[in-house]
Amino acid sequence: MNRLSTEQRIAQLQAQGQAQRLAAQLAIFEAREQLAPLRSVAGVIGLAARALSPGAAAGGAVGRLARFGVGHPWISSTVGTVAWRLLRRRPVALLIAALAGAAAWWLWRPSGRWTRSQAEPPA
């Protein structure tokens, strides 16, 4: 009898340990889920800080656009509101407009290629 109760006690302790591990994993999962929006906001703030910094690699068009948005909040909020409404009502139209804008920027950006007159030394 003593042996059976010892085995039952061991099984009970193992079951309790497994239950505690599962509860801890669930708590970690819930904490990550609750902190996900804060991590997203921190990432956006970090990107904005890098874009607005003086020596930023994205200091070209993105930096100028970000500085303009910060300097003119009423324009930024209006554009943001319109974009949000378009995103909710017509997401495909907003995606097409964004892709067209990106393509136009890509095609009309200043290229870093050498022209023939720059490549040849003066005679």
Image (cartoon, rainbow, N blue to C red):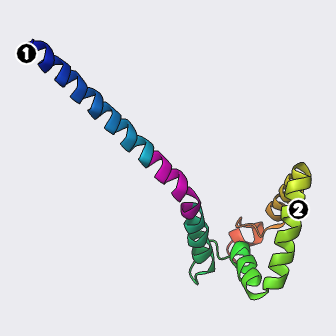
Check if residue 86 falls in the magenta segment.
no
Q: Residue at the spot x=73%, y=80% of the render?
A: 64
Sequence-wise, which precedes: disc 1 or disc 2? 1
x and y percentages locating residue 39 in the rendered image: 54, 62
x and y percentages locating residue 38 in the rendered image: 55, 64
Inspect the image, locate mark 1, and give the three-letter code of the amino acid beneath it.
Asn
Let me know if residue 123 appears in the view.
no
Give the residue pinned by disc 1: 2
Q: Residue furthest left?
A: 2
Q: Nearer the viewer, residue 80 or 69?
A: 80
Indicate whether 83 appears above or below 11.
below
- In the picture, measured across the screen, residue 36 lies left or right of residue 89, that is left
Kindly report the secondary structure that dominates the magenta region of the rendered protein.
helix
Give the residue pinned by disc 2: 85
Q: Nearer the viewer, residue 94 or 114?
A: 94
Q: Which residues are magenta?
A: 28-39
Quote the CA–CA distance across marks 1 and 2: 72 Å
Q: Residue at the spot x=82%, y=70% of the render?
A: 80
Q: Quadrant of residue 102?
A: bottom right
Q: Secondary structure at mark 2?
A: helix
